[in-house]
Image: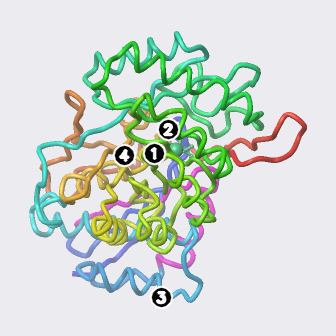
């Protein structure tokens, strides 16, 4: 079998997505997500200009060899653009292999290690009372784990909060947000205290700092949150400096989750091997596809680190489908992030994964069980939308 076409499809059914569709001479197709929020066209160009010409004529059965060819063969390694492009190819090749074998991808990865994929939902509110109502909505829908974010008094446009948490979409919403670490640190422990008091000890609670603190500030927050038993505190500091996590670890037992912006095993290596984190949040689309993500999770398993894959709505249904096959099969699964896509997005990406009672279940169809409706996709042309820039109250640029 040979690859005869590699189509790069950019569509905006409510938000931008980049999808790679591989076509073989046997008439089979495979899909992969290549969406990089706010930088979509860079990946589309990388795929269209530099990757698609290499793929035409190749044997789609050679997944590992194709991965190595695109990674080692490019000379310029890693980075979000390159790794998202490689991810799309790898995901599409796994989809094709499943279709050739007549098996869902999780069967090719070793089969089921659990009955379903436990997901966490997003609850948010301008006020603590609104957030409590939003947590109740998710609990009523069966969620066993909830991430809680609220606005910070005195700041406008806090990360994770919008009028309707179900459609939270930071790209293109506002050009700038404002940040104050003192205001945040004063407020957030009282939020988690109220949520824990209201919902009791069993609900798993998570909170995302979104890379905004220094290690000693994060250590203090982790310690302040210990009474509320978080499942994880996410991205407490920017993770370019993995050694910084040693300082956090010295002071708190609040579990840490990091990795949504990581692209390769090299980004996670020190955090994992020094046991500085508890969950690694790398995703199929941003960390080199199913092949490379499984390599990261295998390394993590040696060091008691579990998976907690990123799953915001800027990761397309193709990525979510692929993530579920990985999640179901690996031994060290932790949690999967889940924000339902809009109806428009779901229509462009027909899929058969399903949610029930706090779990997602991947498709039993051969391959990933997800496709892209190219005619419908063409009705939603690309719309430029960037993520916000974050500034301190005195105007200094800060991590968003
Ligand atoms: O801000 O996916 O945990 N989830 C997150 C996300 C990220 C977006 C960036 O594109 O932090 O909401
Ligand atoms: Co996050």
Mark 1 or mark 2: whose residue is earlier in sequence: 2
Q: Which percent across, then down, holds residue 369?
A: 22, 51
Label 2: how many Cα within 10 Å (few below 14, some 14–19, many 20+): many
Callout 3 touching callout 4 (CB < 8 Å) = no
Q: Check disc 4 and report its element: helix, strand or loop.
A: helix
Q: Check disc 1 and report its element: helix, strand or loop.
A: helix
Label 3, label 1: how far apart the Cα atoms are: 33 Å
Mark 2 or mark 3: whose residue is earlier in sequence: 2
Instruction: Give the residue number, with chain letter if any, for mark 2.
Output: 13
Mark 3 or mark 1: whose residue is earlier in sequence: 3
Instruction: Write down the region rendered in magenta.
Output: 27-52
Name the front one of labels 2 and 3.
3
Residue 92 visible in the snapshot: no
User: Residue visible at 77% across and 47% down?
Assistant: 398
User: Residue visible at 54% across and 28% down?
Assistant: 149
Callout 4 touching callout 2 (CB < 8 Å) = no
* Res 317 label: 4
Name the front one of labels 3 and 1.
3
Label 1: how many Cα within 10 Å (few below 14, some 14–19, many 20+): many
Name above or below for residue 316 compared with residue 240: above
Q: Check disc 2 and report its element: helix, strand or loop.
A: loop
Front residue of this view, candidates 376 and 181: 181
Mark 1 or mark 4: whose residue is earlier in sequence: 4
Callout 1 touching callout 4 (CB < 8 Å) = no
* Res 72 label: 3
Mark 4 or mark 2: whose residue is earlier in sequence: 2
Q: Check disc 3 and report its element: helix, strand or loop.
A: helix
User: Residue visible at 46% across and 14% down?
Assistant: 132
Q: Quadrant of residue 269?
A: bottom left
Label 4: how many Cα within 10 Å (few below 14, some 14–19, many 20+): many
């Amino acid at each position: 079998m040979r690859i005869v076409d590699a189509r790069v499809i950019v569509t905006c059914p409510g938000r931008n997505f980049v999808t790679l569709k591989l076509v073989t001479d046997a008439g089979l197709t495979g899909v992969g997500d290549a969406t990089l929020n706010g930088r979509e066209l860079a990946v589309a160009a990388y795929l269209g200009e530099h990757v698609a010409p290499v793929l035409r004529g190749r044997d789609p059965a050679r997944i590992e060899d194709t991965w190595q060819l695109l990674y080692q063969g490019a000379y310029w390694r890693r980075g979000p653009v390159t790794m998202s492009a490689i991810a799309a190819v790898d995901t599409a090749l796994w989809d094709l292999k499943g279709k050739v074998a007549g098996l869902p991808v999780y069967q090719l990865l070793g089969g089921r290690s659990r009955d379903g994929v436990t997901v966490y939902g997003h609850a948010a509110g301008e006020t603590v009372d609104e957030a409590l109502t939003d947590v109740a909505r998710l609990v009523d829908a069966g969620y066993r784990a909830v991430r809680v974010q609220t606005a910070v008094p005195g700041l406008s446009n806090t990360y994770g909060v919008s009028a309707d948490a179900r459609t939270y979409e930071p790209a293109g919403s506002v050009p700038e947000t404002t940040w104050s670490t003192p205001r945040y640190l004063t407020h957030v422990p009282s939020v988690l205290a109220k949520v824990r008091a209201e919902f009791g000890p069993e609900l798993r609670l998570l909170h995302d700092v979104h890379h905004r603190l220094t290690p000693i500030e994060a250590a203090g927050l982790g310690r302040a949150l210990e009474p509320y038993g978080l499942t994880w505190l996410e991205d407490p500091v920017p993770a370019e400096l993995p050694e910084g996590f040693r300082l956090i670890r010295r002071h708190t037992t609040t579990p840490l989750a990091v990795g949504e912006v990581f692209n390769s095993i090299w980004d996670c290596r020190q955090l994992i091997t020094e046991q500085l984190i508890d969950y690694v949040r790398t995703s199929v689309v941003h960390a080199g596809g199913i092949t490379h993500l499984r390599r990261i999770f295998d390394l993590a398993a040696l060091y008691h680190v579990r998976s907690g894959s990123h799953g915001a709505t800027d990761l397309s249904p193709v990525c979510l489908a692929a993530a579920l096959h990985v999640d179901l099969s690996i031994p060290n699964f932790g949690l999967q992030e889940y924000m339902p896509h809009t109806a428009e997005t779901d229509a462009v990406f027909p899929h058969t994964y399903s949610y029930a009672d706090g779990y997602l279940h991947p498709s039993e169809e051969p391959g990933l069980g997800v496709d892209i409706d190219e005619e419908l996709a063409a009705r939603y042309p690309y719309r430029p939308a960037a993520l916000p820039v974050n500034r301190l109250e005195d105007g200094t640029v800060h991590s968003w």
